[in-house]
Image (cartoon, rainbow, N blue to C red):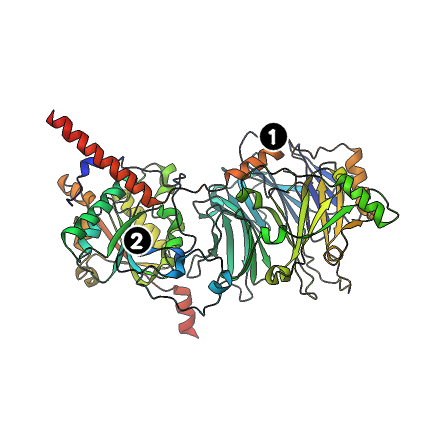
Amino acid sequence: MSEIKISSTGCLAMYLENDNVLVFDLNDTSLCQCLEAESVIDDNSNDLHRNQIKFSPNGQFLIINRPNKHLYIYIQSDYDKFGDSWLLKQIVRVENSISALTLTDEILLIGDRIGDIYKFDLLFNSNNEDLILAAENNRIIRNSSMLLDIIFFRMSNKQSFIITADRENKICLNNYPNNSDNQNYCFGHNQFVSHIKLIDNDRLLSASGDGTLRLWHLPDCMPLAFVHSRALTLQPKQVFFTGLCAFRNSASLAAYQKDVVPKCIEISSSTVNDSIWKMDVACSNPLNSNVYIAFSTYAHQYHSIYLSSLSNMKRLNNEQRELTFDSSYGEIIDYCFPAQKTSLNDYTTHEKCFLYVLFNSNVLVQVDIPSILSYNQTALSVQTNDRIQEINYILANHEFNLVHNKIKKDAFTFKELFENSTDSNNDCHLKRKSETVEEQENRKKQALS
Amino acid sequence: MSLPQKKYYRQRAHSNPLSDHSVEYPIRPDDMDWSSHYPSVIKSFEQQPSNDEESSVSNKRPKLENQLIEFVDIGCGYGGLLVALSPLFPDKLMLGMELRVKVLDYVLDRICALREQHSGQYTNISCLRTNAMKYLPNYFHKGQLSKMFFLYPDPHFKKAKHKWRIINKQLLAEYAYLLRVDGLVYTCTDVLDLHQWMCSCFEQFPLFERINNDDPVIKNDPCIEHVIGSTEEGKKVERNKGDKYLAVFRRIEDPIITKSSSNS
């Protein structure tokens, strides 16, 4: 699927259908760079397209994960005469498709679909002039389950972990760099764990195919809180969002809303419907203790985003909002919060927290989260931000293709991740036992006759 | 009830451990109900799927102290080791794990028949079907096990299949998690290449140390003769006059931690 990611320095990267990536600078939106794939990639595999774009925390490195099993590492340098600042530094080739990846400012960690983890040094300048590097020698951990998300976690006492979320419902803490006594597991999910996010360096928020969001304390893996998506999605306060027209009063807005709120179709079983399709966490300003969570469920992935906060999740005081969009925008492709700024010079008293949403009509929308969460009316009409308008202008004029034929395929591969329930072992054993007894008797009869 | 006959339980020796076997496994060790395996384990009400997560987070509810499994035989085959060890350690619970369905059925029927024929005995062994490469941490708490047995594991000779071997670097981290300090791992095989592979894996891993085969700990250990001879595989090797390679390893504390604590 198309992804968008925003770095801590305000770079917005967008993954296009033809496997090119557009990079905008939110601080100066006249600058736009297209990072091209060198050839047309023929992607017939059934892989989930996730974790396609990642920035390093300091915004210096950009990693693009293309379906041809190659990772492209770009580094930011000064702007050259074409207005391009991202240079291709290295290409990494892996054997199995990459389903999870993460970066610190120094290392790159890759998790693939058979469970191996590879580590690369980003700062190391090898004498090797080859652009393409094979990943084979950099394997550090071999697991057996498909890795869906991976995080590098360093505690204040300098102990580090690689935290992985896998298809076998487990969140595993692997001690890094050497395997020692601190291997630990977070148990609790019923289905694959699709997203894990670090909060405040001592807690972990996880989202899973079983439809729950769980909060864990690290490194002892104590479960702190959990909430099923149904609790947040059954009776939320709905907020209808549009920026396409100006409204004179709330009545006309309400009338417009009735026309354009989209209907969604229930297709699959309830477990799949309630599962968390995507989750993102806003890295909070440390002056303010609230942490914002945006997630969407499988059933409503194209039209609604649910907004909640950590305190709402723990206390269940029904502050969550369901954000539905004007259907003229089309379907939601992806959304994200900007990464946390590493330099905290921005001590504004008014907390700013924006969610950027990308639609298949080639439109980018910026949503102010704190105002939505405190908004008590059901419809919201906003003026679009100038910077966003510039981006939308570029997107519209250049006919970049954001619509994927692969979007429906992604939904299908997502459903494949679910485990089907099986008969309990005891029943099978009894069935098989009666079969073996029958077989024995048949043989005796044959021997006699 | 008579003892089961192997000819009705034949199955191919090799099984792909990494394929999707749709095995049932508990979400966490506390959720596993062992009462159906061992008569001495009482089914506690704790083990219902708790919708009440808050109370499972708080530690106020007293839990029934059930005995925990201490010995695990990974790939127990037809159950020879379990049956031999059961009378030697009557107060320890032992579990065998086997991926092949028919072989598992044989072991369960055998245990059933033995319990009937010798009442009051063989109540401390059982077997279940699971994939030990993926789901072991779901069954046992950290440091719960005191002995682990890997007897005549599938050698998976081809280099591409080395990942299927039951002893490899990543799984060692899991075994180190499950075994208590001073717990023992017993490995035995008739394939020299596999024996050398397993020894090098363990030796490179900081949390295990090798106990030499002539060490008194091994000489006095009642398990050893059964590790070598009690399993079906072991008897087959003897009939074919093959070699047997035994290696025993002890789980130790993290040497980095012990070094720093002795320095401070």
The residue carrying mark 1 is A41
Residue A302 is at least partly visible in this image: yes
Measured along the vertical axis of the image, is residue B63 above or below residue A417?
below
Q: Is residue A80 left or right of residue A136?
A: right
Q: Residues within 10 Å of mark 2 (few under 14, many from 20)?
A: few
Rendering quarter of residue B157: top left
Q: Nearer the viewer, residue A150 or B73?
A: B73
* Kind of residue sitting beneath label 2: Ser
The residue carrying mark 2 is B36
* Kind of residue sitting beneath label 1: Ile
Mark nearer the viewer, 1 or 2: 2
Task: Find residue B26 and report its horizontal and vertical position in percent.
Answer: 40, 52
Q: Quadrant of the N terminus of chain A?
A: top right
Q: Is residue A181 left or right of residue A46?
A: left
Q: Label 1 marks which chain's residue?
A: A
Kindly identify the residue that appears in the image at 58 percent across and 33 percent down.
Answer: A409
Query: Marks 2 and 1: in contact by CB < 8 Å?
Result: no
